[in-house]
Amino acid sequence: MKKLLTLVLTTTAFGAFSQTNLHDAKILGSISIGNQEITSVLDETTGCNHKSTLHTKNLFIVGENVKLDIKENGNQSKIIKPNLPEIVFVDKCNGGNPKDEFQMTEVEFKENVAFLDAKVRSINQNKHAREITLLDFSNHDFGKLKKRIINNNVKFNDEGTGHDQIANDGIYTSLKLFNNGNNHNFQYIGESIRVLSNPIVDPTFKHQTELNQIIDDSNSDPNNPFKFGFSVSCDFDFSGPDCAATDLGFCSNCCLSLTNCSFTANWN
């Protein structure tokens, strides 16, 4: 009887410890990296924002309730969801208060955001949209990065409206459509063609090691047709001539020009 009692007490204590490490969480959004995604998740117990490791697309839905299995002693925490087909780890607490209004300054943008990718996507037989992918490494969730930007006098949005397919996935789609040219030999409607092979960052960018790891992980995926080159440095300029545009809700500090670059996106 004494041994049985000891066993029951030990099991109960372990169960209580496990439940303590399971935090309620909510999916804030995902950003596409090649054929995979990185997901931002809010720990509703602590208020911390976490970013996941690369995982298969469409595992999570924005606003979905999940659990976080919070690990100590340097072990990786992970997202818990019924029937999740793979293990998805998250980074350590990135701080931030999701209830606070956050406006990213130009300095913060330069230090934390990578101009990851640029593509053209066929909309119909004659027209295509432009797409740019921005990856935010700051301590704030993806939803805090502005939904609308201007690049080279072209307005883009990540609101899931117009020709933008998914809101808050980090892929910004042009409001305007462009004529298909000889350089873009689309085979079918919806096809994407990459026009920028190397991610671009500002010289003050602070997350080169993290970006390199994402590039390596994405390039090692045999099913990913889009391979990244090494990142290059350009000046992120927020004072170009296109920055005076304010129509359609676009603001003067939402526009981005890339200057002092060795190459640019081959849009045409």
Image: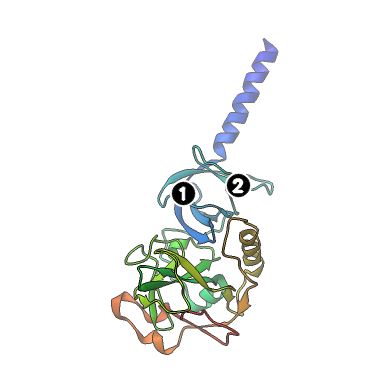
Quarter where residue 120 is shown: bottom left
Residue found at x 37% / y 77%: 178
Confirm or deny contact between disc 2 and disc 1 (CB under 8 A).
no
The dot on residue 77 is 2
Q: Earlier in the sequence, mark 2 or mark 1?
A: 1
Who is closer to the viewer here, 243 or 191?
Answer: 191
Q: Residue furthest bottom?
A: 241
Label 2's element?
strand
Which amino acid, mark 1?
Answer: Phe
Residue found at x 44% / y 69%: 186
Residue 11 image position (x, y, % from top left): 62, 24
Q: Nearer the viewer, mark 2 or mark 1?
A: 1
- Disc 2 to disc 1, C-alpha distance: 17 Å
Quarter where residue 93 is shown: bottom right
Who is closer to the viewer here, 34 or 142?
Answer: 34
Residue found at x 36% / y 64%: 159
Circle 1: is it few (<14), some (14-19), or many (20+) Cα within 10 Å? many
Residue 114 image position (x, y, % from top left): 55, 71
The dot on residue 60 is 1
The dot on residue 72 is none
